[in-house]
């Protein structure tokens, strides 16, 4: 009798396992607001170039959907974005103002960008780049930066704190060379 009971329990357990009825997965830790705490997304520094071009590809796909021309990658705007991402981390505050009082146009000029910075999107988050873009697209002010029809160039950078917090900066510029004719950079 005991043996039959053991076989029944074994068969029922096997049937449940095969049916996908497993014990519930552990729940995500919740913060004081009742929302799940962020899952740490650690960026491997070797992935930086891939991340930059993933952002460019995603932004250009969004711009195509909006009927505006694609952006070109700008090393100068990326350098300006990187400086600002580190500066925001040092300030522990997402802001368009640098600790030295600089604005996106100032930082772009210092980095050697020959056009004009038209806009900047910043974020303090634990999210990867594509989630950050989705958040920016959900806000009118940052969506306008990404979809700006006057923009021709893009720079993007991040700084990740040891805690895992990521400081993102995206800058778009008009691609123009300052000079006698103010003609396009290309």
Image (cartoon, grey):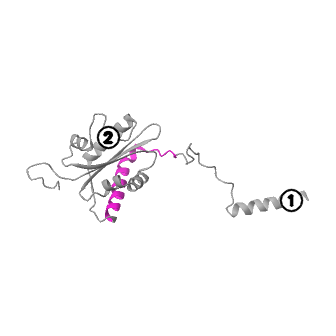
Neighbor class of circle 1 (other Cα within 10 Å; few <14, some 14-19, many 20+) is: few
Q: Which residue is mark 2?
A: 84
- Point out the stretch of residues depicted in magenta: 38-64
Please identify the residue farthest to the left as the structure is shown: 180
Q: Main secondary structure of the magenta part?
A: helix
Q: Which mark is residue 81?
A: none
Q: Quadrant of residue 112?
A: top left
Going 25% across and 41% down the picture, which residue do you hit? 107
Q: Viewer-proximal residue, 18 or 129?
A: 129
Label 1: state its secondary structure: helix
Taking the magenta stretch, the answer to whether it contains residue 60 is: yes
Q: Earlier in the sequence, mark 2 or mark 1?
A: 1
Q: Which residue is mark 1?
A: 5
Q: Quadrant of residue 95?
A: top left
Place of residue 85 in the rendered image (x, y in percent of width and height, measured from the top left): 35, 41
Going 84% across and 57% down the picture, which residue do you hit? 6
In the picture, which quadrant includes the N terminus? Answer: bottom right
């Amino acid at each position: 009798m005991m043996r039959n009971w053991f076989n029944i329990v074994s068969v029922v357990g096997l049937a449940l396992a095969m049916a996908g009825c497993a014990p519930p997965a552990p729940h995500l830790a919740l913060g004081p607001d009742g929302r799940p705490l962020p899952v740490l997304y650690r960026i491997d520094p070797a992935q930086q170039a891939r991340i930059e071009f993933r952002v460019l590809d995603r932004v250009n796909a969004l711009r195509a959907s909006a009927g505006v021309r694609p952006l070109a990658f700008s090393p100068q705007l990326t350098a300006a974005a990187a400086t600002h991402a580190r500066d925001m981390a040092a300030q522990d505050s997402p802001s368009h103002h640098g600790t030295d009082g600089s604005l996106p146009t100032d930082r772009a000029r210092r980095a050697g960008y020959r056009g004009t910075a038209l806009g900047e999107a910043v974020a303090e988050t634990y999210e990867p780049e594509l989630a950050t873009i989705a958040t920016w697209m959900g806000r009118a002010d940052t969506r306008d930066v990404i979809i700006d029809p006057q923009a021709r160039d893009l720079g993007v950078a991040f700084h990740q704190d040891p805690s895992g917090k990521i400081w993102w900066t995206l800058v778009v510029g008009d691609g123009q060379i300052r000079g006698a004719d103010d003609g396009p950079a290309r």
